[in-house]
Image (cartoon, grey):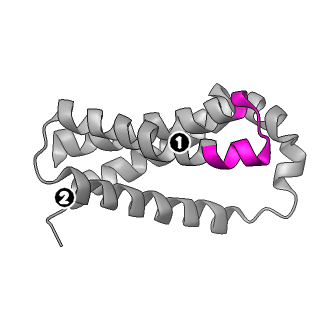
Amino acid sequence: MPHVSLLATLVGTIASFALGALWYGPLFGRAWMAEIGASPESLHRGFNPGLAYGATFVLALVAACAFGVVVGPAPGPGRAVALGVAVGGGFVATAIATNYLFERRSLRLWLITAGYHVVRFALIGAAFGLLG
């Protein structure tokens, strides 16, 4: 397996995790809840925060590590951020769009969800570009 910077992986994971709190909180939380037909109360019913946030952190760690394998060692900030945008927009956003078309989800929901992943992978790219 290629060398993957542990520091960049951890920083990218934490940045991704923090972005999610902002994105689905004060930035787009209300719009996202409206699009999925939820309320703060309904989202907390039966919610196990330890499991949800723990699993989310592990999944973000896996995504950052996989990104590190793809970007390689010492990619430079410009290349790494560009690759992050390409991964988020070209792979993740298009995969989500395919599902959302058949699920008849709104364009607004796709923009919120896909936008998060584009910015998320750009941040992970920045971590690898600066620390990898």
The residue at which mark 2 appears reads as: 5
Q: Where is residue 109? Give x, y as percent.
A: 71, 34
Q: Residues within 10 Å of mark 2 (few under 14, many from 20)?
A: some
Q: Nearer the viewer, residue 83 or 99?
A: 99
Q: Is residue 47 above or below residue 41?
A: below
Magenta span includes 108:
yes
Apparent side of residue 110 relative to residue 10 in the rendered image (left or right): right
Which numbered mark, 1 or 2, is in the foreground of this view? 1
Q: Amino acid at mark 1?
A: Thr
Q: Is residue 53 above or below residue 51?
A: above
- Choose top left, top right, bottom left or bottom right for residue 36: top right
Which region is colored magenta?
98-109
Please tell me in which quadrant of the rendered image residue 127 appears: top left
Percent x, y of residue 93: 53, 41
- For the residues labelled 1 and 2, the Cα–Cα distance comes to 28 Å
Residue 72, label in figure: none
Majority secondary structure of magenta residues: helix
